Image (tube, coloured by chain):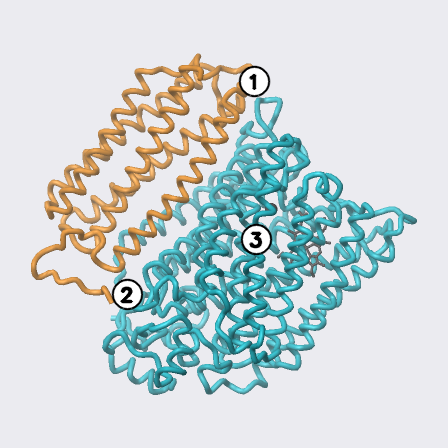
Chain colours: A orange, B cyan
């Protein structure tokens, strides 16, 4: 079976899926992301159903601030770009480049998370506690779940960077980096939906 | 270097706790599923004792509610699902000619998470009683206002065990897509693999909404969320939508693998190939798709309006078409075949009419005006038990008798088997047929007693007696397992049924690597093809070499334990006085869980090789 890969001519052009193990990881991860999509969809549906349910508490129009969300979006979109570039470096077998780009990705992600925490604290000061209304609960749950994904992704990528900082690209770690960057992308795509459904529609009052 | 001989020194217990072998995990699933099945079955018998006579006070209403809830929940999540996973784990890699599953570690992880989730659900009895809002946990019955701690165990326990199921499903999908032997094209795959694949996909798409819904309910109950509290802007019907978007496909998650088993057993004992293979595959896909489009038929009486109800009524009836295709194909398979009526075949063939009956009452319930009459009566109880027992349990029994020799190296006793079958079949119809009538004359579901003089006493008595007959049947099965373990001849042939698919080409007992050489598949029913057109052995697709195997690991067990502790800590938040603060318990669980995951991701584990000489030695011993 596709167990061994000839390494005498250097790494293959797709090191992340040239072994059966890599292929399995690759497919398994896509399926996992399918499940994540459905889970987020459920939370989106819940938010859409409950966003008018403010029960006299603060509403989206009163709270959301465009500049803040814009900065957050830019940070996350850029980090997604750097993670893609990192994968290009991996396919070109340029380990140093890949590592640097991954570190930049992490830093941008940390920035995003910082702003999100600031945002939540700010809203609580404006009277939107988790238990204030159904709108509050569904907002914090949806956006917070995304934030938790960001945090998990950051820990994951950081672990990979530390663990493999000296090993170069191998057939074992290539799938790992690749899958982590896929995950990061996914987080980014979810954010685009949150940006639209939660913030734009919230501010626009649509 | 760890080699196969080194593993022999380990203690038996350690071996089972750390195993990543899909065959051993199958046995673990089988044992756990059976234990839960017996437990939930006894709960059913208690309920039937309570309902045996009018105005009985054997149980209190509260206990009855707890029994209903736990019976339903355990049967669906902790008995039927794991029993199906037992067969999927054992059979699928063998049927597709694979040495192993795609993610052996994840496979073990799935088992242990499921197991600890089930345990978490079960320990609720020691903390003031089980959940009591029905297996559907409708709000507001399940909200903090009306339901006690038991429901926290429901919410968190199911959440944990659901993660296990999800994780296993991903493993099955990748295994089936990526690990098939050369020549095993999709359209040569046995139907059990097909249904296994489709069901795993359904799990990914259905269990995630459940996970989300349970998370919402947990947030409401433990962290003060307002999702389902109308006063605070929440919406109670939302729960029903989320629950049934999961709940309806769940029925198909259970019944499709049973279809798969039936599609293996009927051809084997009719000595004919499965009639209409391609149609069967497409029918499976259509059923899976429609399974997602019909959830509102559980909510006809909620008041969503005539248009919504009509659309979902029609979609529901649509499922009858692909199901009918399947039924006719099984009948045509038997038609003109040389049928052997052993226990497996009896279960498989009696599945067909029983399931049809459950399907017919399903179509009746899909008619909205009719559902307004029958909703929440015993008619519904009868309907779904015809599907669940007359379908799923009969399928599982057929699978048990059919695959038992491959799993354990000996057959189950046929005389006891036939006795079990008739007890079960008669007991089943006695219990549930009459419940259709009870429902029609107005006996409500989920009610712990009924009044005298309404003409319900006799029928309820008959029903209860029937349930004991069914219980006796399960007892006979258990006796049979013990009896056969000591008194049955070991199987010396690899293929005791003269069957058709690849799993029967392996030696018994199966070496840990399944196939010394990956087989070359040349046709549908590849093993039968080689027996008829070849020399009776599978052609190898590769030379004999060292075989690579994964190492066992205790981490899946630890992660399961970690999730158990974490979940328990969350529930402790709602307990009045706790000895240790909940956050300490939660912290311990989180550290165990994520710590193990970290260890797993940092420590590279490349497994080990079984050297060629040893493979040759093992092959000589088993053949
Ligand atoms: C010995 C066989 C069984 C008997 C006698 C039995 C009996 C019962 C009874 C008395 C109820 C309560 C009905 C009510 O008052 O609404 C019930 C509910 C239920 N049963 Fe069974 N049952 C059996 C097997 C099974 C099996 C094998 C499954 C699934 C694999 C199952 C799934 C359910 C479910 C989902 C409910 C609904 C619980 C709820 O309403 O929350 N049962 N059963
Ligand atoms: Cu349904």
First in sequence: mark 3 vs mark 2: 3
Q: Quadrant of residue B22?
A: bottom left
For label 3, the crowd category at 10 Å Cα-Cα, with few meaning under 14, some 14 to 19 and many 20 or more, is few
Can residue B156 be seen by looking at this rendering?
yes
Residue B509 picture location, percent across and down: 43, 79
Classify B402 as above or below B70. Answer: below
Quadrant for the C terminus of chain B in the image:
bottom left
Tell me the residue that label 3 is attached to. Answer: B321
> Which residue is at a point 83% across and 59% down the rendered structure image?
B461
Left or right placement of residue B457 versus residue A154 in this view: right
Q: Do marks 1 and 2 share a chain?
A: no
Gap between marks 3 and 1, in whole Å?
Answer: 47 Å
Gap between marks 3 and 2, in whole Å?
Answer: 48 Å
Tell me the residue that label 1 is attached to. Answer: A55
Q: Which mark is residue B607?
A: 2
- Chain assignment, label 1: A
Query: Which structural element holds mark 3?
Result: helix
- Chain assignment, label 3: B
- Chain assignment, label 2: B
Can residue A154 be seen by looking at this rendering?
no
Query: Which structural element holds mark 1?
Result: loop
**Residue furthest to the right:** B453
Q: Quadrant of residue B174?
A: bottom left
């Amino acid at each position: 079976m596709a167990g061994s890969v000839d390494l005498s001519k250097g790494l293959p052009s797709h090191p992340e899926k040239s072994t059966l193990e890599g292929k399995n990881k690759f497919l398994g991860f896509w399926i996992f992301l399918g499940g994540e999509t459905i889970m987020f969809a459920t939370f989106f549906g819940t938010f859409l159903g409950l966003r008018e349910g403010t029960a006299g508490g603060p509403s989206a129009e009163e709270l959301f601030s465009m500049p803040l969300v814009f900065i957050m979006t830019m940070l996350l979109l850029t980090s997604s770009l750097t993670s893609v570039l990192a994968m290009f470096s991996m396919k070109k077998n340029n380990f140093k480049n890949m590592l640097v780009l991954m570190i930049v990705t992490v830093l941008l992600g940390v920035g995003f998370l910082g702003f999100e925490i600031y945002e939540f604290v700010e809203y609580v000061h404006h009277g939107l506690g988790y238990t204030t209304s159904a709108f509050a609960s569904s907002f914090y749950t949806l956006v917070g779940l995304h934030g938790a994904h960001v945090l998990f992704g950051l820990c994951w990528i950081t672990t990979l960077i530390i663990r493999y900082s000296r090993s170069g690209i191998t057939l074992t770690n290539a799938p790992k980096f690749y899958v982590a960057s896929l995950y990061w992308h996914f987080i980014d795509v979810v954010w685009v939906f949150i940006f639209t459904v939660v913030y734009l529609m919230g501010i626009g009052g649509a | 270097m760890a080699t196969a001989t080194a593993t022999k020194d380990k203690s038996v217990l350690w071996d089972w706790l750390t195993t990543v072998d899909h065959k051993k995990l199958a046995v673990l699933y089988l044992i756990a599923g059976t234990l839960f099945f017996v437990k939930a079955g006894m709960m059913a018998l208690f309920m039937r004792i309570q309902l045996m006579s009018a105005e009985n006070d054997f149980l209190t209403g509260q206990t009855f509610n707890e029994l209903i809830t736990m019976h339903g929940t355990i049967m669906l999540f902790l008995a039927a699902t794991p029993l199906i996973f037992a067969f999927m784990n054992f059979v699928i890699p063998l049927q597709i000619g694979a040495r192993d599953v795609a993610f052996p570690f994840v496979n073990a992880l799935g088992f242990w998470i499921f197991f600890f989730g089930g345990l978490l659900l079960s320990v609720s009895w020691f903390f003031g009683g089980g959940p009591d809002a029905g297996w559907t946990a409708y709000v507001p019955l399940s909200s903090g206002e009306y339901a006690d701690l038991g429901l926290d165990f429901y919410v968190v326990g199911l959440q944990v065990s659901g993660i296990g199921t999800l994780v296993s499903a991903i493993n099955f999908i990748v295994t089936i897509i990526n690990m098939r032997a050369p020549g095993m094209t999709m359209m040569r795959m046995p139907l059990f693999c097909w249904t296994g694949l489709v069901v795993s996909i359904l799990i990914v798409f259905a269990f995630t909404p459940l996970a989300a819904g349970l998370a919402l309910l947990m947030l409401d109950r433990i962290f003060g969320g307002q999702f389902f509290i109308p006063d605070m802007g929440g919406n109670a019907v939302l729960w029903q939508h989320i629950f049934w978007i999961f709940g309806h496909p769940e029925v198909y998650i259970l019944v499709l693998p049973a279809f798969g088993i039936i599609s293996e057993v009927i051809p084997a004992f009719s000595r004919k190939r499965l009639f209409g293979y391609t149609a069967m595959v497409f029918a499976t896909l259509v059923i899976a798709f429609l399974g997602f489009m019909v959830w509102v038929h559980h909510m006809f009486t909620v008041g969503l309006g005539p248009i919504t109800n009509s659309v979902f009524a029609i979609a529901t009836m649509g499922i009858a078409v692909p199901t009918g295709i399947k039924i006719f194909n099984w009948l045509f398979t038997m038609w003109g075949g040389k049928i052997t009526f052993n226990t497996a075949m009896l279960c498989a063939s009696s599945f067909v009419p029983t399931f049809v009956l459950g399907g017919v009452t399903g179509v009746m319930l899909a008619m909205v005006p009719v559902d307004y009459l029958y909703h929440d009566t015993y008619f519904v109880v009868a309907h779904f038990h015809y599907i669940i027992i007359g379908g799923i349990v009969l399928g599982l029994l057929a699978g048990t008798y059919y695959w038992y020799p491959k799993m354990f190296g000996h057959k189950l006793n046929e005389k006891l088997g036939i006795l079990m079958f008739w007890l079960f079949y008669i007991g089943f119809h006695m219990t549930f047929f009459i419940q259709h009538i009870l429902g029609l004359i107005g006996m409500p579901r989920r009610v712990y007693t009924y009044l005298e003089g309404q003409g319900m006493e006799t029928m309820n008595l008959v029903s209860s007696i029937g349930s004991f007959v069914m219980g006796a049947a399960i007892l006979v099965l258990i006796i049979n397992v013990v009896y056969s373990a000591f008194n049955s001849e070991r199987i010396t042939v690899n293929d005791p049924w003269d069957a058709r698919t690849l799993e029967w080409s392996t030696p018994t007992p199966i070496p840990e690597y399944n196939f010394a050489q990956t087989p070359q598949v040349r046709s549908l029913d590849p093993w039968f093809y080689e027996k008829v057109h070849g020399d009776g052995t599978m052609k190898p697709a590769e030379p004999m070499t060292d075989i690579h195997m994964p190492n066992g690991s205790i981490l899946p067990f630890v992660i399961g334990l970690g999730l158990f502790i974490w979940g328990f800590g969350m529930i402790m938040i709602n307990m009045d006085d706790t000895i240790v603060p909940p956050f300490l318990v939660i912290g311990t669980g989180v550290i165990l869980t994520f710590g193990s995951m970290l260890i797993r991701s940092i420590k590279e584990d490349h497994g080990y090789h079984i050297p060629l000489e040893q493979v040759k030695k093992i092959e000589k011993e088993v053949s």
